[in-house]
Amino acid sequence: MNLRKKKELAAKTLKVGKARICFVNSRRDEIKEAITKQDIKDLKQEGAILVRNIGGRTKNVKRKGKKGAGNVRQKVNTRKRDYVVMTRKLRKIVAGMKVRGEIERDETKDIRNKIRNRVFKSGAHLKKYVGDLKK
């Protein structure tokens, strides 16, 4: 008794693969007479058609790795923006000191080079450096 077509119909009806469909031997005559999807569903309800569980190895889902402290990078744009803002601020302070006569022309050049090389972290740091120069 060839039940290949019945197995295909059962697989399509129950939305599983053909390999998972299993017929009970004692009820083969009933299965052979089933011609509609509803017949297949009824036989499944009665237990004449069994659906095997999925076997095999389950797929391991890779966990997303967390960023460690060593992998955190600051964006280039932020670094550049911070540099530009600080440089402009410090240069403005130096220009004001030069106008007021607190520092001379050659000192101004030296300080501007140090600003460019990021020696000073803030305006207060720059003012402290200039104060130390006068002493």
Image (tube, grey):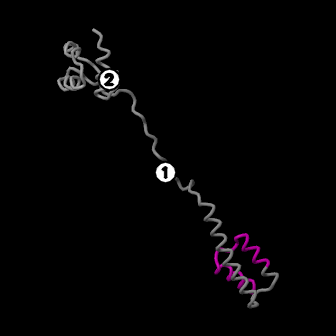
Type of amino acid under label 1: Lys
Q: Which mark is residue 20?
A: 2
Q: State the residue at coordinates (39%, 32%).
A: 58
Position of the C terminus by quadrant: bottom right
Please give the label number shown on residue 107: none
Check residue 66 in the rendering and tell me which mark sits there, or answer none.
1
Instruction: Answer with left or right where residue 74 lies relative to residue 11.
Output: right
Percent across and percent down for residue 1 are: 27, 8
Q: Which residue occupies 73% across, 69% down?
A: 117
Of the residues under marks 1 and 2, which one precedes in the sequence?
A: 2
User: Is label 2 in a helix, a strand or a loop?
Assistant: helix
Asked where in the image residue 38 lies, by quadrant, the reply is top left
Secondary structure at numbered mark 1? loop
Compared across the picture, whether 100 is left or right of 25 comes to: right
Q: Nearer the viewer, residue 89 or 28?
A: 28
The amino acid at mark 2 is: Arg
Residue 119 position, x and y percent, is 70, 72
In the image, which residues are magenta? 109-135
Q: Position of residue 123 (x, y in %)?
A: 65, 80
